[in-house]
Amino acid sequence: MMSEKATKKLLTIPEASQILQKIDVEKADQIQKRTLDYASKFSKATPESAKKLRKQLESECGLSEEEAVEVINVMPKSIEELRTFTSGWRKLLPTETLEKILKALD
């Protein structure tokens, strides 16, 4: 049961998966089970590497926490794929920054 003052925290898929793996699946509700299944299937990094990568993307590439989480969840492999995200963010990132992001993801 959540307290009245629940806090929100942005999580990457690997971090969410790590948290959900601690719950008792027998006692989990349908949403928790589906979310665990999704997180297990679509996690593209370890929770530890995701946390490290998020900090790196924020400090070295100038991404916001939300942008870093989005990039880590998808792990784009090309400049073109990465530009798809940045167009949705309504900010233009220089090619050098996009290359730096891809290098960090590699």
Image (spheres, helix red, strand yellow):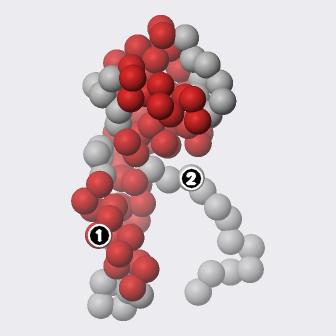
Label whose residue precedes the other's in the sequence (1 or 2): 2
Task: Work out whether residue 91 or residue 31 is closer to the camera in this orientation and state it.
Answer: 91
Residue most extreme to the top:
96
Indicate whether 7 appears above or below 78: below
Residue 87 image-quadrant placement: top right
Q: Name the residue under label 1.
A: 37
Q: In this view, does 96 lie to the left or right of 102?
A: right
Indicate whether 19 appears above or below 25: above
The x and y percentages for residue 95 are: 48, 10
Q: Distance between the residues labelled 1 and 2?
A: 19 Å
Point 29% across, 69% down: residue: 37
Residue most extreme to the left:
41
Residue 31 image-quadrant placement: bottom left
On the rendered image, what quadrant is the N terminus found in?
bottom right
Q: Which amino acid does label 2 sit on?
A: Leu
Q: Name the residue under label 2.
A: 10
Q: What element carries label 1?
A: helix
Label 2 CA crowd tier, 10 Å (few <14, some 14–19, many 20+): few
Proximity of marks 1 and 2: CB atoms separated by less than 8 Å: no
Point 49% across, 42% down: residue: 70
Indicate whether 95 appears above or below 87: above
The x and y percentages for residue 92 are: 61, 19
The x and y percentages for residue 71 are: 45, 37
On the rendered image, what quadrant is the C terminus found in?
top left
Q: What residue type is labelled 1?
A: Asp
Point 29% across, 54% down: residue: 42
Q: What element carries label 2?
A: loop
Task: Work out whether residue 86 or residue 55 is closer to the camera in this orientation and state it.
Answer: 86
Mark 1 or 2, closer to the camera = 1
Residue most extreme to the bottom:
27
